[in-house]
């Protein structure tokens, strides 16, 4: 496959939605205007943990301009059941409870009530007039604290599950699971060196620039219409229908342009609330979160406590590894610890492994996915221990990794065996990169490396392709385009049809207008929706061959398609020429496909980073950064590089500055973009990239998916670089100036 | 017979064995055969006639979108995995848009 | 309800009149009253730069300017960058360099970068980074944005009269 030459794949066309996005014409969720539009505002809990004694909405309702107030009592009584809404199965009561609290509030910022009014200012004022009487309860904010016997309980009925078994242990540990492979004791006994280290990572936010928003109109015909910013319109449809006890066919969701998501725009927060307000008022209602609400009320990604133990022979071969991962789920079960456990040693072939995972609820916002969720925390721990082993054994850190690298056939601790993966290729590319050998001189400077993994996902996607008489096609898909996927999907159809990327017009449509399509997440869109486009294009070709055969009086099997032309003995017609003759050969041609693909190919990403630490202030500067990732096949290399650069910089922010700075009362003390310090252009150098292509045999073009693995290695690589710069091993994220100074002071 | 990998926390049913053999043309049949050999294990994998929430099944290295209906061959490797909510991939086998029960 | 105020301002070269409440920000006026929704809100406290516009040639975050303060001012928003059907060299460069992913910060970056190139036609990389540090992008890691500004600067320099563009 790698020797095949492509016409479209691997080129860098201008993205189809580009002009609208540089002229300000593209419509995002908050841009919706419509006649009679009301504006919603949400009242949120000032306590991290409290019982709600009463809610009095009369003063708010009396304010001029207020049209409706809703609380959890306005939800229909659907009872509880288990639902799967795109990210694994969850009790409906948890999803509903997070949207509007009932009985108890579980974190500061937990939504309690909502108002619709004629302007956003009146709505905000009215929300502040709602009187809620709380009985404050003690709160727990970290996993180790919440796991302690006697810790305050978030859910008094939550019993720890152990692989399908409900135990009778009531605690904040929602689930405990274990993966084990081989004989751990024997493995450690064989080791010449065993290192055991503990790590803490802070809660961080995805930090998309566009706040959550939703507009709902409960129409007079009983249908609920929603316009919103989401990674998955069908997830919004299904969640909203479940919560409001409606058949899914009664809900239509139109995904607007989305201003970033990174996993954080999979959960549903506002849509059912806007819907209830619209039902009460008979008017469309728009709710847009403030930045503070985004920080306090939407899913950050878990903070964690991790213990790693690795044993190695003198020659560097790993003999055993053990991990304990306790991830903070936030207010409701569902930390990303399952993924953490499946990635913590994913880069290595280790014969004896045990991994224990704990999903722990704490009084912080319910966590959501964030770009390779769970994997960055885990790799920070593993990859710094691996670096320490290399140091102890006097080995090059990349040589040590290569010696133990996972490859096709390696069995992971969760039991699965790898198919073709690019771990070795990425490590070799890192070793061969000029950055790795470049001299790095000067005081307080150091270089670090690390590698990370993400599985990527398959999941259903649907697509139709209509052929236009001018030789172009219209491609209809259901994947919201967060970073150029209209184009990477369209390019795969163009490649099949032998037409330029610009002759495919991709449109992302509402849930009435395309078959079910899972979220834009899991690095799946270019892989799975691209595959649907590939199949739909094949369907177009099949029908077009029939038309050519009709023109020529031949059997369809006599027609072949090559180089953009249909050919049979003595006959030839281009795709565009035949497109102009569809009317006379039988009418329009529409190709369609739905896929739920197997053959998902995971991606490895590595990075090389040079830092300089200011020993006076503890500030770490990134001098040079190189990201190297296995894309399988880079459909549009510019947007692959863009994913690598963006993921790397989010990893840098996570490493150096970002954290929920929590007061003991559970209040986030830095809930603004001034104080929650994301990297700016001035904090960074250029982010160099090198795309490795180890084609995924499971995809027609070899695509793996590149959205996520790139965020995984930077914190560990930076920690390793800091060690080489100033001699301290950082085992806490973020490695912010105060945290780094503490370690420097301890050392001196 | 297919090779079935038993999750660590279910090995009490198999006398500590991490890997056992079982017959069945589908995952559902395979679980019935496991139950005959290791009584009690079915109830840890199924809730009623469905896979338990947060358990997914992988056949030949790939988490199956079909779950219990997935075909198993005599040379297959079958894994039952804890699919904790979140993170897409571990739960990727169990997506059913508006699933009951 | 507060009494509305009458405001006259030149917006993207055209004189516009509108009524706004004194508490409404320029950002709200642009988006909700004038329907110029290209200017985005990311934080409403001046820290993300998504709502950046030019006000009498000066860069402002429009969420921190009150609507009535725009009285008599000349405002340029992202909608005012292209000349008719011709994109501004910065807009072209952003497309060619793939300098946007989700695109929600892009209007603010374009306006800020235009202000830079209007003042300093040939900024260094460090100067570009310093100038754009008021604008947050969470998708791109800034690499391709910086390159796009460099490309636009080079194109403007190569074009006769490029420095005199609006």
Image (cartoon, rainbow, N blue to C red):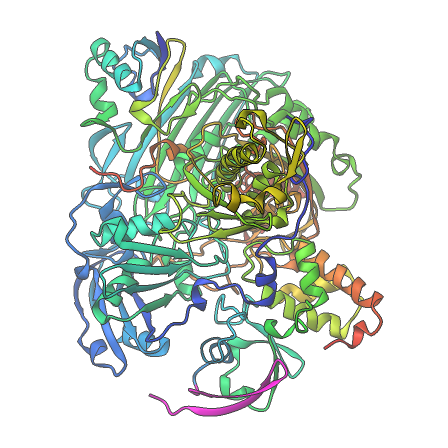
Q: Quadrant of the N terminus of chain A?
A: top right
Measured from the top left, where is residue B16 in percent x and y?
A: 31, 12
The magenta stretch spans residue C14: yes
> Relative to A397, is A544 on the left or the right?
left
Residue A404 quadrant: top right
Residue A710 % position (x, y) = 58, 41
Q: Residue at x 40, y 49 (%)?
A: A232
Identify the residue at image location x=34%, y=44%: A145
Visible residue check, residue A609:
no
- Residue B53 drawn above or below residue A349: below
**Which quadrant is the C terminus of chain A positioned in?**
top right
Q: Is residue A726 magenta?
A: no
- Regarding residue A722, the answer to whether it shows in the image is yes
A102 in relation to A625, above or below: below
Please state the horizontal and vertical placement of residue B27, each as a whole percent of the image: 30, 19
Q: How many marks?
A: 0
In the displayed structure, would residue A117 be above or below residue A403?
Answer: below
Please identify the residue farthest to the top as the structure is shown.
B1
Q: Where's residue A123, x and y in %? A: 31, 75
Q: Main secondary structure of the magenta part?
A: strand
Q: What is the span of residues highlighted in magenta in the rendered image? A: C1-22
Residue in the foreground of this view, choosing between A437 and A569: A569
């Amino acid at each position: 496959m790698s020797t095949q030459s492509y016409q479209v794949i691997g080129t860098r066309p201008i993205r189809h939605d580009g002009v609208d996005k540089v002229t300000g014409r593209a419509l995002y969720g908050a841009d919706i205007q419509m006649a009679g539009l009301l504006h919603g505002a949400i009242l949120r809990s000032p306590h991290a943990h409290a019982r709600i004694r009463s809610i009095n909405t009369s003063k708010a309702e009396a304010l001029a301009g207020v049209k409706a107030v809703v609380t959890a009592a306005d939800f229909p009584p659907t009872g509880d059941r288990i639902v799967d809404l795109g990210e694994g199965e969850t009790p409906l009561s948890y999803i509903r409870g997070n949207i509007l609290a009932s009985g108890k509030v579980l974190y500061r910022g937990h939504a309690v009530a909502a108002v619709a009014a004629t302007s956003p200012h009146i709505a905000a004022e009215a929300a502040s007039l709602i009187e809620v009487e709380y009985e404050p309860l003690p709160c727990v904010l970290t996993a180790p604290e919440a796991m302690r016997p006697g810790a305050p309980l978030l859910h008094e009925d939550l019993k720890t599950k152990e692989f399908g078994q409900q135990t009778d242990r009531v605690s904040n540990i929602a689930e405990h699971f274990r993966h084990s492979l081989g004989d751990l004791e024997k493995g450690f006994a064989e080791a010449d060196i065993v290192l055991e280290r503990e790590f803490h990572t802070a809660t961080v936010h995805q930090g998309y620039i566009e706040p959550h928003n939703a507009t709902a109109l409960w129409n007079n015909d009983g249908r609920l219409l929603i316009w919103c910013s989401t990674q998955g319109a069908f997830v919004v449809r299904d969640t909203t229908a479940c919560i409001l006890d409606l058949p899914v066919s009664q809900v239509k969701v139109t995904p607007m342009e989305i201003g970033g998501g990174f996993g954080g725009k999979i959960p549903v927060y506002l849509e059912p609330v806007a819907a209830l307000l619209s039902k009460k008022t008979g008017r469309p209602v728009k709710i847009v979160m403030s930045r503070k609400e985004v920080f306090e009320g939407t899913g950050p990604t878990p903070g964690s406590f991790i213990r790693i133990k690795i044993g190695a022979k003198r020659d560097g071969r790993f003999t055993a590894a053990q991990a304990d991962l306790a991830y903070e789920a936030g207010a409701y079960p569902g930390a990303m610890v399952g993924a953490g456990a499946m990635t913590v040693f994913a880069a290595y072939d280790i014969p004896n492994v045990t991994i224990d995972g704990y999903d722990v609820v704490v009084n912080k916002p319910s966590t959501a996915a964030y770009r390779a969720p769970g994997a960055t925390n885990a790799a920070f721990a593993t990859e710094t221990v691996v670096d320490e082993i290399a140091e102890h054994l006097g080995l090059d850190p990349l040589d040590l990794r290569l010696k133990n690298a996972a490859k096709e056939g390696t069995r992971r601790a969760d039991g699965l065996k790898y198919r073709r993966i690019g771990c070795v290729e990425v490590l070799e590319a890192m070793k061969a990169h000029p950055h790795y050998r470049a001299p790095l001189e000067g005081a307080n400077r150091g270089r670090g490396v690390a590698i990370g993994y993400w599985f990527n996902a398959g999941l259903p996607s649907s697509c139709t392709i209509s052929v236009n008489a001018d030789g172009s096609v219209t491609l209809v898909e259901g994947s919201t385009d967060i970073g150029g996927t209209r184009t990477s999907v369209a390019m795969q159809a163009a490649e099949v049809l032998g037409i330029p990327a610009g002759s495919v017009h991709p449109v992302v449509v509402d849930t009435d207008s395309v078959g079910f399509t899972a979220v834009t997440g899991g690095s799946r869109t270019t892989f799975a929706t691209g595959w649907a486009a590939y199949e739909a294009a094949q369907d177009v070709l099949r029908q077009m061959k029939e038309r050519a055969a009709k023109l020529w009086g031949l059997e369809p099997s006599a027609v072949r398609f090559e180089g953009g032309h249909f050919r049979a003995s003595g006959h030839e017609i281009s795709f565009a020429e035949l497109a102009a003759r569809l009317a006379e050969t039988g009418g329009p041609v529409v190709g369609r496909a739905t896929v739920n693909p197997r053959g998902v190919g995971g991606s490895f990403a590595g990075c090389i980073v040079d830092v300089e630490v200011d020993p006076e202030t503890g500030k770490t500067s990134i001098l040079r950064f190189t990201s190297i990732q296995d894309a399988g096949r880079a459909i549009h290399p510019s947007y692959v590089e863009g994913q690598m650069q963006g993921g790397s910089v989010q990893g840098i922010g996570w490493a150096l500055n970002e954290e929920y700075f929590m007061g003991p009362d559970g209040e986030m003390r830095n809930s603004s973009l001034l104080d929650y310090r994301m990297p700016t252009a001035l904090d960074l150098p250029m982010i160099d990239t090198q795309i490795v292509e180890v084609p995924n045999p499971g995809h027609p073009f070899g695509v793996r998916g590149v959205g996520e693995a790139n965020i995984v290695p930077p914190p560990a690589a930076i920690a390793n670089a800091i060690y080489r710069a100033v001699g301290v091993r950082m085992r806490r994220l973020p490695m912010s100036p105060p945290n780094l100074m503490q370690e420097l002071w301890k050392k001196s | 017979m297919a090779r079935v990998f038993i999750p660590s926390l279910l090995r009490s049913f198999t006398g500590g064995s991490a890997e056992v053999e079982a017959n069945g043309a589908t995952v559902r049949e395979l679980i019935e055969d496991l139950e005959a050999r290791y009584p009690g294990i079915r109830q840890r994998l199924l809730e009623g006639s469905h896979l338990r929430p947060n358990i997914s099944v992988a056949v030949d290295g790939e988490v199956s979108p079909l779950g219990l209906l997935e075909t198993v061959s005599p040379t297959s490797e079958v894994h039952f995995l804890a699919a904790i909510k979140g993170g897409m991939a571990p739960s990727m086998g169990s997506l059913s848009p508006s699933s009951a029960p | 309800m507060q009494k509305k105020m009458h405001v006259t301002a030149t917006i993207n070269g055209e004189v516009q009149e509108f009524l706004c409440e004194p508490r409404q920000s320029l950002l709200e006026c642009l988006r909700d009253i004038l329907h110029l929704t290209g200017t985005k809100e990311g934080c409403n406290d001046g820290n993300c730069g998504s709502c950046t516009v030019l006000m009498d040639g000066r860069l402002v975050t429009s969420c921190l300017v009150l609507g009535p303060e725009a009285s008599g001012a000349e405002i340029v928003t992202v909608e005012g960058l292209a000349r008719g059907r011709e994109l501004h060299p910065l807009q072209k460069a952003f497309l060619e360099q793939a300098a946007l992913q989700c695109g929600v910060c892009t209007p603010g970056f374009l306006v800020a970068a235009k202000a830079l190139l209007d003042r300093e036609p040939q900024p260094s990389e460090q100067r570009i980074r310093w100038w754009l540090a008021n604008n947050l992008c969470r998708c791109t890691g800034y690499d391709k944005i910086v390159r796009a500004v460099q490309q636009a600067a080079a194109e403007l320099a190569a074009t006769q009269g490029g420095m005199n563009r609006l």
